[in-house]
Image (tube, grey):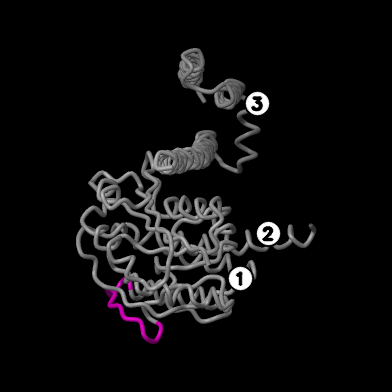
Amino acid sequence: MSIHATIVVDLIIAILIFDVLRLVIGKKLYVGYAVIWLGVLIAFGVLVSVPPILNMFTRLMGTKLTLSALILMALMLVFWALIYLSSRLSILADRVTKIAQYIGTSELEKREKSIQGTGADNTADSD
Amino acid sequence: MKSLVVVPAYNEGQNIRQVLVALPEASVTFDVLVIDDCSTDNTGDVVAELGIPQIRLPCNLGYARAVQTGLRYAVNHEYDAVVLIDADGQHNPNVIPSMLEPLKRGEADLTVGSRFVHGGSYRASFGRAIGIRLFSHLASFLLKQKVTDTSSGCKAMHIGVARALIASHFVDFHAEALVYVTRLGYGVREVPITVGNRAQGSSMYSPLSFVTYPLQTILLMLVAMWEASQHRSEEFHR
């Protein structure tokens, strides 16, 4: 990769790191997720900025061009992130389900208790 | 046998009245519980007007989660059996006694109202008929017993089956649920039912479901088999 391209990529990574930190400070991103993204961004920055590591990575991926290796890795990262997000969404949906079921059932039980209470009061009155 | 009839409903304001009014015509006694899955029409108001107990979910959870809510209620309130019928008016409440009878006699733990077994009647669209037949064959193979209607919403079950089903992550309580309970050792039997046409409104299945439903159900059947085997091995080790 040319020095120009390396600088551009590093600059984008720096902006993304800044954005992740901004989201954490604004309480819009959990620290647990932020750590993952910061780790990925820093690792990507190091990979792009240090040519021997990048060359080793290209050989490891079995591609001829450095760019192909990076695109391959980026694609895998995107798939992993989407699967991970789907999993988190499923877990959250499950929690929402449990809360909704609890609210709905509690309201019915509350109504039933108040009806029973009214019935008991009426019986007491008639006595 | 203390039984609860669970009627999951979503935007069935035009149909649910006739379903609930017809329920007392069945010749057995049971309690009725409507699960209003956060309908945007007057479903909840119609049910309230008729004085029938209902759980009004604060957000739309989908058919299976609505059913699960009803099963959970039945388990918590110590019912002996649960009957599921649709709120669209397609199921005749007169089938409830025949759905419960095999449970009472101890001949089955779960009965499925079949539209295709001898005595049942239903005319499905071409695509749907192929899907139902395909899944029936697949489920029959996995269940090691013949089933003809895996997607029927009309079911009756012992509370033990309900308890097992609420612990799982099923989508539609269809073929995968049958595979799961059978693998757990519960007996399944089909009962012939007559299904009418939906009076008003539209089905919960979108055109996209014709692509996603088969894939989803096949995956769920495999997961159900794995879950059941895990459950059985846990029981064994206990």
Q: Is residue B126 magenta?
A: yes
Q: Can you say which quadrant of the picture contains the C terminus of chain B?
A: bottom right
- Residue name at image x 47 percent, y 17 percent: A23
Residue B106 x, y percent position in the rendering: 59, 76
Q: Which sits in the foreground, B116 or B34?
A: B34
Mark closest to the chain's N terminus, 1 or 2: 1
Which of labels 1 and 2 is toward the front? Answer: 1
Q: Which residues are magenta?
A: B117-128
Q: Which residue is mark 1?
A: B186
Which of labels 2 and 3 is toward the front? Answer: 2
Residue A110 shown left or right of residue B188 in the figure: left
Residue B57 figure quarter: top left
Q: Label 2: how many residues lie within 10 Å, few (<14), some (14-19) or many (20+)? A: some
Tell me if I can see residue B122 in this picture.
yes
Chain hosting mark 2: B
Residue A124 x, y percent position in the rendering: 44, 40
Query: Real-space Cα distance between discs 2 and 3?
Result: 51 Å
Discs 1 and 2 carry the same chain letter: yes
Question: In the image, which disc is placed on residue A52?
Answer: 3
Q: Which sits in the foreground, B42 or B64?
A: B42
Q: Secondary structure at mark 1?
A: loop
Residue B129's place in the image compared with A9, above or below, is below
Q: Secondary structure at mark 2?
A: helix
Q: Label 1: how many residues lie within 10 Å, few (<14), some (14-19) or many (20+)? A: some
* Kind of residue indicated by mark 3: Pro
Query: Real-space Cα distance between discs 3 and 1?
Result: 62 Å
* Kind of residue indicated by mark 2: His
Chain hosting mark 3: A
Q: Which residue is mark 2?
A: B231
